[in-house]
Image (cartoon, rainbow, N blue to C red):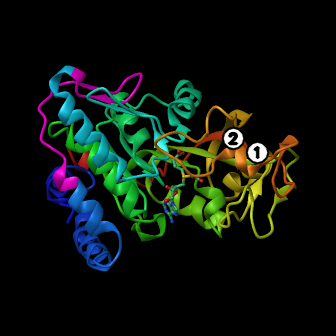
Amino acid sequence: MIDFSEFYQQIAKSRLQHWLHCLPAQLHEWQKGQLHGDLPRWGRALRKLPPTNTNYVKLTDSVSIGRPDEISSGEQKKITNLLDQFHPWRKGPFNVHGIDIDTEWRSDWKWDRLAPHISPLKHRYVLDVGCGSGYHLWRMRGAGAKMAVGIDPSPLFLCQFEAIKHFSNGYQGIQLLPLGIEDLPELNAFDTVFSMGVLYHRRSPIDHLMQLKAQLCDGGELVLETLVIEGDENQVLVPGDRYAKMRNVWFIPSSAALVNWLKKCGFENIRVVDEGKTDLGEQRRTQWMRNESLADFLDSKDSNKTIEGYPAPIRTIIIANKPVDPQNTSLEAHYE
Ligand SMILES: Nc1ncnc2c1ncn2[C@@H]1O[C@H](C[S@+](CC[C@H]([NH3+])C(=O)[O-])CC(=O)[O-])[C@@H](O)[C@H]1O
């Protein structure tokens, strides 16, 4: 249904080549398990997307692929209708041949907050864990990453990614894989690993941090973005049944507590580079995401509280490094 063979060819020549011992079999199993879900329907919509031909792939300030004047108005309508079959579009925005996919989240705002603080991505191998539709993967390539790999178990987000990629005229060095963090072997190969909006969904956040560390090469950089509460290093919120109507929220620490967790996991050079309340303009209902959004998750009389009475979402960005192991010779020395 989804063809990953070109990606396998790309990584066969790279420092990720050791991943090939398990990845193709894993993805084959995954596709077999999707036969009775929505993937076949989304796959049909993907195959109906008309071929277009562009060399316009702009990834620096936005994700804009293809110019408006490269397609007819009839094609524009057809593409818009097909893209709408991948509703709800949560992470973006994307512009495809002038079609503005105004997603629920302004993921570009998050990118703008973190970009000044991270090590330059030029020539780096980067992994984005829980990458959603892959919006940030495109921005990582735009910032010069040699290869941007995203993992996200949701088949819808894979199809959204493939839909955008369809228009990019064979653009390489970027791929979303339908895997969870728990499915990865210890690759110890990425220069930068991003985990954004994932930690609070994990039942075991310390294991999550250790799994992220196991993907980094020595000295590599972790960019961790997650929900936090205000408070000192001893404060952690474990919400009841729901937090902001989400059922799958487990641990919301303070930034100070999270710094301690990272220390405990053996990270170094840990710094909080940004912390702020989520703005109603950053997560909202749009014509491409017609379900409930942040305004519906907050107390209508007090926007400092969620509808359950918990503190409204505050998000932190923390950067840390995996220590260099003096015993370990650099991966770079082995490949390329
Ligand atoms: N086990 C797992 N492993 C990896 N990903 C997972 C797992 N479980 C769920 N996810 C994925 O993690 C993403 C979290 S959203 C952040 C998107 C982007 N990073 C953003 O910063 O905007 C945050 C939110 O919407 O609450 C979803 O796409 C899940 O499918």
Task: Tell me if 95 is positioned left or right of 226 in this view.
Answer: left
**Residue 303 coordinates in the image, percent (x, y):** 82, 40
Q: Is mark 1 on a helix, strand or loop?
A: helix
Residue 294: image x %, image y %?
Answer: 68, 45
Relative to 127, say whether 53 is above or below: above
Q: Which of 157 and 104 is in front in this view?
A: 104
Determine crowd level at label 1: few under 14, some 14-19, many 20+ residues with C-alpha closer than 10 A.
many
Q: Please give the residue where the numbered disc 1 appears in the rendered image.
A: 255
User: Image point 88% across, 46% down: which residue?
Assistant: 231
**What amino acid type should be assigned to the residue bearing mark 1?**
Ser
Q: Is residue 172 above or below residue 151?
A: above
**Is residue 49 on the magenta stretch?**
yes
Is residue 115 shown left or right of residue 145?
right
Regarding mark 2 in the picture, which secondary structure is present there?
strand
Q: Is residue 258 among what the camera can see?
A: yes
Magenta segment boundaries in residue numbering: 46-68
Q: Name the residue under label 2.
A: 316
**Whole-number angstrom distance, CA of label 1 to CA of label 2:** 7 Å
Whether 38 is drawn above or below 49: the answer is below
Quadrant of res 65: top left
Magenta residues, dominant SS class = loop
Query: Residue at left 67%, top 61%?
Result: 246
Is the Cβ of the residue at disc 1 closer than 8 Å to that at disc 2? yes
